[in-house]
Amino acid sequence: MNEPQNSLPQAYDDEIDLWALWDTVWSGRWLIIAITSLFAVGGIAYALMAQEWWRADVVLAPADKKALPGALGQLGGLASLAGVNIGGGGDQEPLAVLRSKGFARAFITEQDLMPVLLKDVKSTDGKPLDIRDALREFEKVRSVSDDKKTGLVTLGIRWKDPETAASWANLLVKRLNERLRVEALAESQRNVDFLQKEMASTSVVSLQQSMGRVLEGEMQKLMLARGNEEFAFKVIDPATPPKRRDAPKRALVAIVATLAGGFLSLLAVFLRKAIRERRRPASGVV
């Protein structure tokens, strides 16, 4: 019979707690407004003063190598025995080179980018900055992603002005195609010279015929490399100076700063109340 009588005070206590909670928030409203406003102004100031970053992307597709004769695949064993490499590095070689530190280091050196990349970088160990530091900064700037389904590759450059970002992205692709084309030309020329020499030194007709087919394929590879500037990657969508910055996202920064200020201000108000309540009994002791 006593339980229904005890349930009413419990509900009443819950109601009192809600009112006490609201009273605490209301009594600290000026502190909440002050802290939230401070964080909001700080977030807006940071968003306006922070370094702007721009991202330029170039979309690539692996160059079509189907023009090479199918007989090369069948003669791969013979070519390998003869010391001739006719397989190349496969479709993954250009992507691996694009991501490699060696290619990035050569690009930095060729374009004299060390002063640009290290302009705002300070040495942490007291030693002079060198190409390794520039390479580390460049790896933060460059990004490479590939879509396994479509085979498309996206090269992105994130830099402090849009024109430079687009220029570096397009130039990287151009230098990659040039490098792999020159390497393919040199390899094919070595293979052609080797095959011509071996054909002249053998009198076996069947072997001469087989080597002649390999030589024909190498000559086609040689002509393909000489006449194709987009040797490794074909540019589907070249990089253009972006109109919108990649960072900072000013609206998001302001919203997050304001929410953080509101949360911390509420925490400060409740901590202040808890401290006051702990001191109150002690102050009443005579």
Image (cartoon, rainbow, N blue to C red):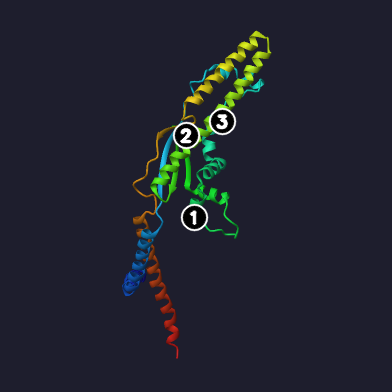
What residue does disc 1 label?
119
Q: Could you tell me which residue is drawn at 44 percent across and 47 percent down?
A: 158
Q: Of the residues tagged 3 and 2, which is closer to the observer? A: 3
Question: What amino acid is found at the position of numbered circle 2 in the picture?
Answer: Lys
Q: Residues within 10 Å of mark 3 (few under 14, many from 20)?
A: few
In the foreground, 99 or 146: 99
How far is the residue under mark 3 from the one under mark 1?
Answer: 34 Å
Q: Could you tell me which residue is drawn at 37 percent across and 50 percent down?
A: 245
Q: How far from the left and from the top, in percent, is residue 265? A: 38, 69
Question: Which circle's residue, 3 or 1, is located before the other in the chain?
Answer: 1
What residue does disc 2 label?
148
In the foreground, 247 or 214: 214
Is 52 situated left or right of 215 in this image?
left
Badge 3 vs badge 2, beta-carbon distance below 8 Å: no
Badge 2 vs badge 1, beta-carbon distance below 8 Å: no
Q: Is residue 158 above or below residue 125?
A: above
Q: Could you tell me which residue is drawn at 48 percent across and 20 percent down?
A: 67
Tell me if I can see residue 1 in this picture: no
In the foreground, 244 or 22: 244
Q: How far from the left and from the top, in percent, is residue 40? A: 35, 64
Q: How far from the left and from the top, in percent, is residue 88? A: 57, 27
Q: Is residue 86 above or below residue 98?
A: above
In the picture, the quarter occupied by the N terminus is bottom left
Q: Residues within 10 Å of mark 2 (few under 14, many from 20)?
A: few
Instruction: Kindly identify which numbered label has been placed on residue 183.
Output: 3
Q: Residues within 10 Å of mark 1 (few under 14, many from 20)?
A: few
Q: Is residue 172 above or below residue 89?
A: below
